[in-house]
Image: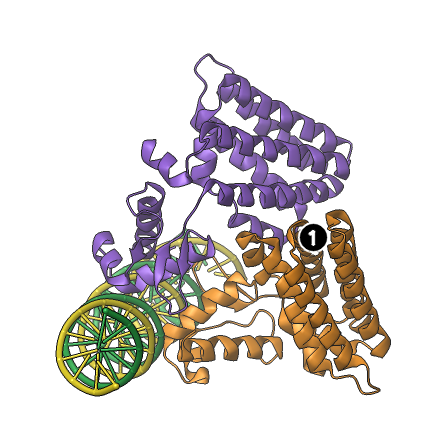
Chain colours: A purple, B orange, C green, D yellow
DNA sequence: GTATGGTATATTGTATACAAATGCCCAAGG
DNA sequence: CCTTGGGCATTTGTATACAATATACCATAC
């Protein structure tokens, strides 16, 4: 999207996720506009987007505040994500063609290359992981499913989760992708759904273990 | 929300759903502003909302068009709705308190009153139906689930579905609500989920039967 | 002391002007 | 005839001024 609007979006979002704007803080359009160096118009756009992601909430008179994003909210998001991505995996397994299967295999191979060494390339892992899940979502052939999941997948959460993974956890993740590939190769939708749901629920527990007792904001501050 | 912004939203939405703006039609902000009697600013707000609902799509250069909304798209939405509302019903069954259960019972009683006579009061049915589902969603206690479902529940689709229901179908719907109430009373989440999923999938087939072979837009035009 | 109402202030909503970009058309060259 | 490039028309993006609305504060009455 356009430059100023993106700057406002990225700026406000990072202020929220870094804890610079704590949960419950008032978000005046004028003040944000000044801090981001843009006018109110793109700020309003950005607030709408952030509201859709539930990072910002509005009171009954249209004033904006930083949403409270506790561990239970993250759990909420992960639970829905497990259900929806599981569903996507089922549909993908029932529709996938051989060419796409090959693409997924190459993608998971790239993930393997990124994590095989002693010092895993986490950025590479994340890139491969994102592509892998994106291909499945695309193959599921449901536009609405894609658009629903978009609001559920918080990249900062995934980023932090992966960075708390040790090499073993990264390899386990790669291994789960392999199992998913096996389910796809057999066109076994139920299998694929189960593996995907397990894959994502495990990711949540990795996140929760790393941040036990801390809210998402406390965590971000300490990072 | 604010007046002009709402007028733009409601106006554009009804133009799309009535077929006045056919699938694929270009949506210039200026033209829409004039037709709605407001300036471009509220039109832009409205387009963002409609885009989130997938009624409007944007090309890569930010130009807006009426999305193509075929029967298969409606099926897509209903499938996801069945899954998510099923999940909501499960959670609600596991959390519901007696006071809320009573509210739901009164709500379904109101639905019964609306449809008992020879000439069913479809508007009354719809109002009760909306409340019934809203209470369940609220009881499920997942903000994200509510926000996801909001984009999936197209009131015009529900409206048309209900208006194609005969008295028998209306009563069957009321009966399914009763079964849901039984599952809630037993706090049986799995039962509630299954009943809700069936309830919504049946609603889809009622819709599909009534509009066999027609796109949503064709149908709207003929209504 | 509390409640109530009104006014001042702050904040959001809308309109409009202008800037930036996109798309379209036609003309020139291959 | 097709391709390509430039320039004009159209469309979207941004800034800003002003209007409508909500909030906060204080004075006054009870």
Q: Which of A208 and A155 is in front in this view?
A: A208
Where is the N terminus of chain A found, in terms of image quarters?
Answer: bottom left
Q: Mark 1 points at which residue?
A: B93
Q: Is residue B185 left or right of residue B49?
A: right
**In this figure, what is the number of numbered marks?**
1
Task: Return the residue found at the far right.
Answer: B168
Dot 1 falls on a residue whose secondary structure is: helix
Residue located 30% across and 65% down the image? A41
Q: In this view, does B21 lie to the left or right of A92?
A: left
Chain under numbered label 1: B
Residue located 36% across and 79% down the image? B39
Crowd band around label 1 with a 10 angstrom C-alpha radius: few (<14), some (14–19), many (20+): many
Q: Which of B113 and A34 is in front in this view?
A: B113
User: Does the rendering let one see residue B215?
Assistant: no
Residue located 44% across and 73% down the image? B28
Find residue B25 and report its horizontal and vertical position in percent: 55, 72
Kindly indicate the quadrant of the structure image that contains residue B29. Answer: bottom left
Find residue B174 and report its horizontal and vertical position in percent: 79, 70
State whether residue B107 is above or below residue A167.
Answer: below
Kindly indicate the quadrant of the structure image that contains residue A119. Answer: top left
State whether residue C26 is above or below residue A156.
Answer: below
Q: Nearer the viewer, residue A89 or B152?
A: B152
Q: In this view, does D13 lie to the left or right of C9?
A: right
Find residue A40 and report its horizontal and vertical position in percent: 27, 63
State whether residue A28 is above or below residue B45.
Answer: above
Find residue B79 and report its horizontal and vertical position in percent: 71, 56
User: Does the rendering let one see residue B114?
Assistant: yes
Where is the C terminus of chain A found, in terms of image quarters?
Answer: top left
């Amino acid at each position: 999207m356009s430059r100023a609007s993106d700057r406002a979006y990225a700026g406000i979002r990072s202020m929220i996720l870094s804890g610079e704007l704590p949960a419950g803080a008032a978000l005046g359009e004028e003040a944000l506009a000044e801090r981001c160096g843009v006018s109110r118009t793109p700020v309003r756009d950005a607030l709408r987007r952030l509201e859709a992601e539930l990072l910002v909430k509005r009171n009954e008179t249209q004033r904006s505040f930083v949403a409270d994003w506790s561990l239970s909210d993250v759990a909420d998001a992960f639970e829905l994500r497990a259900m929806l991505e599981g569903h996507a995996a089922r549909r993908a397994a029932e529709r996938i063609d051989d060419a796409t299967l090959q693409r997924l295999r190459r993608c998971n191979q790239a993930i393997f290359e990124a994590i095989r060494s002693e010092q895993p390339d986490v950025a590479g892992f994340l890139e491969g992981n994102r592509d892998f899940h994106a291909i499945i979502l695309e193959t599921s052939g449901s536009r609405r499913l894609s658009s629903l999941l978009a609001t559920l997948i918080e990249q900062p959460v995934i980023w932090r989760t992966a960075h708390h993974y040790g090499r073993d956890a990264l390899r386990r993740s790669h291994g789960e992708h392999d199992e998913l590939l096996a389910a796809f190769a057999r066109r076994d939708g139920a299998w694929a759904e189960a593996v995907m749901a397990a894959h994502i629920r495990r990711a949540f527990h990795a996140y929760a273990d790393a941040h036990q007792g801390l809210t998402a904001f406390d965590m971000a501050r300490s990072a």
